[in-house]
Amino acid sequence: MSTIKEKKKIITLPEVRGVLEKLDEETADQIQRRTLDYVSKFAKSSKEDAKKIRQSLVKEAKLTDKEAVEITNIMPKSKEELRVFTSGWKKLLSDEILDKILQILKEHSK
């Protein structure tokens, strides 16, 4: 008997929206429709912009992929707001890194 290994990938809300928009509404289940409704309301960037933000946060701000996705989903606008979300992480971010994160978000937001 073979086992199927599940591959998990962390994705941003805009990426979730992109996946769910490809589904046929007739065959989508209630959870898929509700999730699409949610991400359509709360995704704060396009799929392409979210990908660029995520990559920049990992490369330039040295965040983990998971941290970059969290920040991309939230799109904080100030250091104070950013600190609220990063306070639960097991590392302390310097003001320089916080400024870099905010700069990246500003560059790629509409």
Image: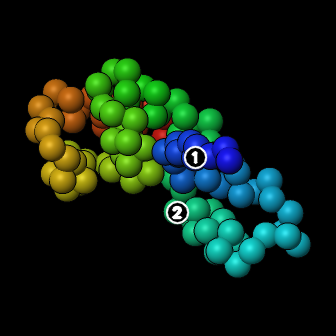
Extreme residue in the top direction: 59
Q: Quadrant of residue 102?
A: top left
Give x and y (percent) for residue 71.
36, 46
Query: In this picture, is 53 found above or below 47?
Result: above
The residue depicted at 46 percent of the width and 33 percent of the height is: 53
Kindly state the secondary structure of the residue where label 2 is placed: helix
Residue 70 appears in the rendering: yes
The residue depicted at 52 percent of the width and 30 percent of the height is: 52
Give x and y (percent) for residue 65.
40, 35
The residue depicted at 38 percent of the width and 42 percent of the height is: 66
Extreme residue in the bottom direction: 30
Is 29 positioned to the left or the right of 60 in the image?
Answer: right
Viewer-side residue, 100 vs 71: 71
Q: Tell me the residue that label 1 is attached to.
A: 6
Kindly state the secondary structure of the residue where label 1 is placed: loop
Is 103 positioned to the left or the right of 31 in the image?
Answer: left
Mark 1 to mark 2 CA distance (whole Å):
27 Å
Q: Tell me the residue that label 2 is attached to.
A: 42
| Mark 1 or 2, closer to the camera | 1
Viewer-side residue, 81 vs 33: 33
**Mark 2 Cα shell of 10 Å, populated few (<14), some (14-19), many (≥20):** some
Give x and y (percent) for residue 89.
19, 47
Give the residue type at disc 1: Glu
Give the residue type at disc 2: Phe
The residue depicted at 18 percent of the width and 53 percent of the height is: 88
